[in-house]
Image (cartoon, rainbow, N blue to C red):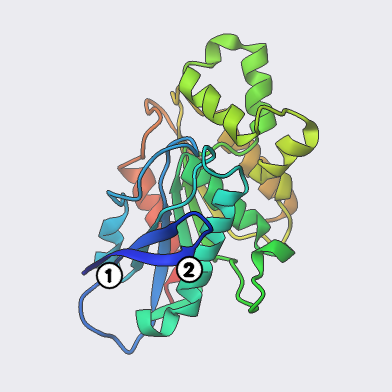
Amino acid sequence: MIQSNVVYVEREDRPLHLDLYRLSGTSKKLRPAVVFLHGGGWRSGDRKPCRIEGMSEHGYVVASVEYRFTDDAPFPAALEDCREAVRWLKRNHERLGIDPERIGVVGFAAGGHLGLMLATTGDLPEALAEDGVSARVQAVVAWSAPTDIGAVLALWEKEPDRMKSAEFAASIMALIESDNAPERLHAVSPVSFVSSGDTPCFLIQGEDDPLVPAEQTQIFVDKMKETGVTVEGRVVSGMGHHPIMGPAALAAKKFLDQYLTP
């Protein structure tokens, strides 16, 4: 069953929507939920089609979320939207049949970056709404996600041939508002916020990704391991910048099941 164009928050300029995918019928057993965050360099993209729609057939309630782009509202607006989508699911968990303590995130590229921001900032004051509802989630899977924006810029400066997309470079500049000051790079990088209480994460990336350097996954995994947080990372040989299928995708599903299903 698909429920499309559900308004989850009213922003000053427009409402934001999500689409819900779930099994038909009712169940006395509360189901886990997964938020899907699309890619597009924080400047474009669409919640449709939802790349993980099929998870609804495995008992998950899937929410594919729209968020604001950097051309409309500077970061962290997109992160605030993602937080509010999580809170919306929690506030409406009873009528949706969702367990509010079993919510995960799957994000691709820019969406993966936002998912990792949710994972690493869940204990910060800004993750808690005035009504006491938290945006903390229980598991995050990130595909091809930038994790340390400062390291991306440093690599491009050191090895200019690694910057193979002017469009992606423009997306990074829009994310940091063309300001590579240390405090700004810190604020937009998930690795900056890693701490011992973070949400478990699973990162997947193609070794031949022409946009996001493959080192980005290892940087984040190493930092989480140093801090003692549960994390898994896979760099898949022969794969580029697109959703990973096959064994790595099955491993990601198993990871979500571990933290979201009883």
Residue 168 appears left or right of 239? right
Residue 209: x, y in percent? 45, 26
Q: Residues within 10 Å of mark 2 (few under 14, many from 20)?
A: many
Q: Secondary structure at mark 1?
A: loop
Q: Is residue 41 visible?
A: yes
Q: Nearer the viewer, residue 198 or 84?
A: 84
First of labels 2, 1 by sequence position? 1
Q: How many marks?
A: 2
Q: Which residue is at 44% across, 53% downward?
A: 106
For image coordinates 52% across by 37% down, the residue present is 71
Does residue 213 appear in this view?
no
Viewer-nearest residue: 104 or 85: 85
| Residue 207 versus residue 65 in the image, above or below | above
Which image quarter: residue 21? bottom left
Q: CA distance from mark 2 to mark 1?
A: 14 Å
Residue extending furthest toward the front: 13
Q: Which mark is residue 22?
A: 1
Q: Please, what secondary structure does the residue beneath circle 2 have?
A: strand
Q: Which mark is residue 171?
A: none
| Amino acid type of the residue that numbered disc 1 sits on in the rendered structure | Arg
Give the numbered dot on residue 103.
2
Residue 118, horizontal then vertical, whole percent: 59, 56
Percent across and percent down for residue 109 are 46, 39
Looking at the image, the residue that sits furthest to the bottom is 28
Is residue 32 or residue 14 the one in the foreground?
A: 14
Q: Are marks 2 and 1 in contact (CB under 8 Å)?
A: no
